[in-house]
Image: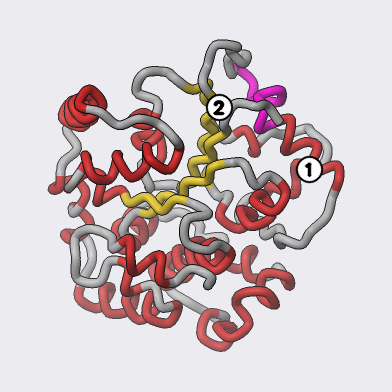
Amino acid sequence: MPNKPVILLVGAARHSTNLVANILNFDNEYQDSVEPFRLRGEANMFSFARWKYIPSYHHDAELSKITARILSGQLANPGSEPPLQNNAGFLVQELRAHLWLGWLHSNFPDVRIVLLFRHPLAVISSRVTFEWRSYLSQTLSQADLLADHLERFKPMIQGPRSALERHAIMWCIQHYVPLKQFTRGEIHLAFFENLIAQPELEVRRLFTFVGRTFDSHMASATREFLDDKRIGVAVSQAWQKHLSSADLDRSNAILRLFGLDAIYGDRKIGSVSAAEGLMRN
């Protein structure tokens, strides 16, 4: 691992992870890498397969060695630029990493992990509309995951489900597991809707966590970037036009099952305190 700070920005498809990365790295202060853990052809890379769970207590010297190479920029996706010596740090964007963040933190505690949330109903609506596969059966086939985190939910989440219900359950698993693996302050919880509604506050929180200075120049750059992308509150709330009252009821019932309904509730932005209240004590 290098002496320079490493930031791991974790989101999922339809989370606008790249948007947050661009804001965080607005001045190209960091060398960046997009989904390097999805490399193919490397020994043990199957351990980072889609929605693979790696327990925090798992010990694998070869896996740790590969991870160290990725986090130092030595092992990158084809086409990635080589590491630059004058960068202040390394920014890694990774999708579908939620279920092995506990393991990563146990083995690489200096990595600054940012977990990005987007409103579950927005994500569910989008994935159902585009007819994406949920990978729920594959995820629930992992005995360690069930034993460590999901045993008490098994009767309610297994069995035949509609596409909407499958995606709702997956959103819950993807966020419930890391919340229960970390204590407040160990990782940063970022919220897409908060970034759109109150950008200065949300970016200031993010910069404080990663150790960057937030000033008037950064505040101006954030506003200009969002304006240029034409991303506003209307965009972040567009999902409301696509879900019926029955869809809302079914989705919210699943969120309540995991206790995750409090994060957004009836609000248009996420509650940092509610999310942190769900973390491990």
Quarter occupied by residue 8: top right
256 lies above or below 96: below
Residue nearest the observer in this picture, 123 or 186: 186
Q: Secondary structure at mark 2?
A: strand
Question: What residue is drawn where x is 54% and y is 69%?
Answer: 180
Numbered marks: total = 2
Q: Which residues are magenta?
A: 70-79
Whether residue 170 is visible to the viewer of this picture, yes or no, is no
Q: Which residue is mark 2?
A: 90
Q: Residue at the right extreme?
A: 61
Question: Residue 76: image x %, image y %?
Answer: 66, 25
Q: Secondary structure at mark 1?
A: helix
Q: Which mark is residue 64?
A: 1
Neighbour tally class for label 2: few under 14, some 14-19, many 20 plus, Cα within 10 Å: many
Q: Is residue 17 left or right of residue 280?
A: left
Three-letter code, disc 2: Phe
